[in-house]
């Protein structure tokens, strides 16, 4: 394995609070953490009102925050260019804030738009360990850190799924990415040692499914292919529009409403370019149900073939894999992974591989060698474990 990362959020919180003091003078009112995620199964189902099964990663975005009284929003990121971005209230308009700051500012905008009293400004300092451009939801982590911090700072007491909706609205309407709600739900609602069974039609009815990965002698590798893809560039939106067209042609509110028995007839009647999308969504929703059943039986290793079948469907039907993600899956399976698949939106990003403890180096080494032979950049490999969702951290 090229890198195994252990992050200690509480130690990091003190450092983030110190940097806040240097940047803005005086202490923050608190430090909050929001994690990135990997999805075990249930890809491109959320915007079809379907099901997903993500876990939160130990990697988080930390936010030290303090309200202001003059309406100005000042933002700084340890991963940015060193500048403090200073925005007047008038800048809170969709499309007006380029780059990383659009995500946090979008959340402030979405909260205000929903009628919540958050308009008096704030000083915000971010520091993240969620890799960017790796399909691990670094943007959702940024958004959700702001959502939970503002919820507490302004005494809003919104239910977590509502915070996820606000964060999704920020990304859809302020940043302009037509994502579903999975990433934000994972970041705010996941719990340690569990996977989140999400029904995207009714996110408030999510449930925690025990995911005893380490107890069963297993590990989950996240293999970042280092091929980056911007979900805002049109491919994601085109797929989403294709699914919506297919649902309309089938006379359904959403593809989630297609009864399993009617899939063959639907595939016969749909235009050739839409049928594979529908087959993926229908079979992927079924894979989520199957994965949840296996986890409830305590059979974590039985997820392996479900993951691999999910990858084949994303590669052949949904067509969102790429040579690097396909190669990572093949090389991981060849080295004995129990199952592997791309995770997230696709066109690059990360692959997850379920492996027996002790096989991490063999599987990671196999993928690294395969990448080198194919002339790809070396992948980055993390050891993932189901971690807690967004939360306030203690500081000195
Ligand atoms: C991205 C989006 C999610 C979801 C996945 C695909 O991560 O942000 O809403 O659609 O792609 O499952």
Image (cartoon, helix red, strand yellow):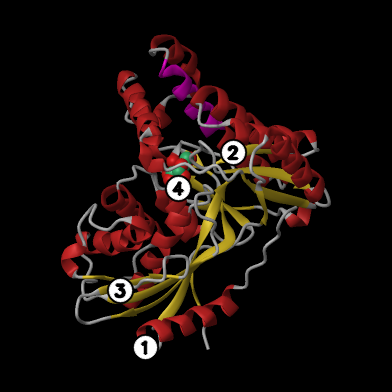
- Is residue 154 visible in the rendered image? The answer is no
Mark 3 or mark 2, which has the lower sequence index?
A: 3
The reply to whether dot 3 and dot 4 touch (C-beta < 8 Å) is no
C-alpha span from label 3 to label 4: 28 Å
106 or 244: nearer the viewer:
106
Q: Dot 1, how many residues are within 10 Å of its Cα: few (below 14), some (14-19), or many (20+)?
A: few
Q: Is residue 154 left or right of residue 348?
A: left
Mark 1 or mark 4, which has the lower sequence index?
A: 1
Q: Dot 2, how many residues are within 10 Å of its Cα: few (below 14), some (14-19), or many (20+)?
A: many
Beta carbon at label 2 within 8 Å of ligand 1 = no
Instruction: Specify the segment rendered in magenta.
Output: 273-286
Mark 4 or mark 2, which has the lower sequence index?
A: 4
Question: SS at mark 2?
Answer: strand
Beta carbon at label 4 within 8 Å of ligand 1 = yes
Mark 2 or mark 1, which has the lower sequence index?
A: 1
The quadrant in which residue 275 appears is top left
Nearer to us: label 4 or label 2: 2
Question: SS at mark 4?
Answer: helix
- What residue is rendered at 35% in x and 52% in y? 168
- Is residue 139 visible in the rendered image? The answer is yes
Q: Is residue 39 above or below residue 347?
A: below
Mark 3 or mark 1, which has the lower sequence index?
A: 1
Disc 2 marks which residue? Answer: 342
Disc 1 marks which residue? Answer: 25
C-alpha span from label 1 to label 4: 37 Å
Mark 3 or mark 4, which has the lower sequence index?
A: 3
Which residue appears farthest toward the left when viewing the image?
90
C-alpha span from label 3 to label 1: 13 Å
Disc 3 marks which residue? Answer: 74
């Amino acid at each position: 394995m090229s890198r195994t990362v252990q992050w200690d959020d509480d130690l990091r919180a003190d450092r983030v609070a110190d940097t806040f003091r240097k940047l803005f003078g005086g202490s923050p009112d608190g430090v909050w953490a929001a994690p990135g995620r990997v999805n075990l199964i249930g890809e491109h189902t959320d915007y079809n009102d379907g099901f997903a099964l993500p876990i939160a990663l130990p990697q988080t975005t930390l936010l030290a925050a303090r309200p202001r009284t003059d309406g100005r929003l000042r933002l700084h990121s340890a991963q940015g260019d060193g500048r403090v971005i200073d925005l007047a209230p008038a800048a809170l308009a969709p499309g007006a804030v380029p780059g990383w700051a659009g995500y946090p500012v979008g959340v402030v905008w979405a909260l205000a738009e929903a009628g919540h009293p958050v308009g008096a400004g704030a000083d915000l300092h971010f520091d993240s360990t969620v890799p960017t451009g790796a399909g691990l939801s670094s943007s959702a982590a940024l958004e959700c850190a702001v959502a939970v911090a503002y919820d507490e700072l302004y005494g809003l007491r919104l239910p977590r799924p509502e915070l996820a909706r606000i964060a999704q609205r920020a990304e859809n309407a302020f940043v302009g990415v037509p994502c579903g709600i999975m990433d934000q739900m994972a970041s705010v609602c996941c719990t340690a040692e569990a996977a989140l069974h999400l029904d995207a039609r009714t996110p408030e009815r999510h449930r925690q499914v025990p995911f005893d990965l380490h107890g069963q002698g297993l590990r989950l590798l996240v293999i970042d292919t280092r091929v980056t893809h911007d979900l805002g560039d049109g491919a994601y939106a085109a797929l989403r529009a294709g699914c919506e067209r297919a649902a309309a042609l089938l006379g359904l509110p959403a593809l989630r409403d297609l009864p399993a028995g009617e899939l063959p007839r639907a595939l016969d009647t749909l235009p050739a370019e839409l049928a594979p999308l529908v087959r993926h969504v229908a079979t992927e929703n079924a894979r989520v149900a199957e994965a949840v059943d296996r986890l409830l039986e305590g059979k974590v290793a039985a997820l392996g073939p479900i993951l691999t079948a999910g990858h084949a469907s994303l590669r052949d039907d949904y067509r969102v894999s790429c040579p690097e993600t396909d190669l990572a899956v093949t090389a991981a399976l060849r080295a004995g992974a129990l199952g592997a698949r791309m995770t997230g939106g696709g066109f690059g990003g990360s692959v997850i591989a379920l492996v027996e403890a002790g096989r991490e180096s063999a599987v990671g080494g196999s993928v690294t060698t395969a990448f080198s032979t194919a002339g790809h950049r070396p992948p980055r490999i993390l050891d993932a474990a189901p971690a807690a969702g967004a939360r306030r951290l203690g500081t000195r």
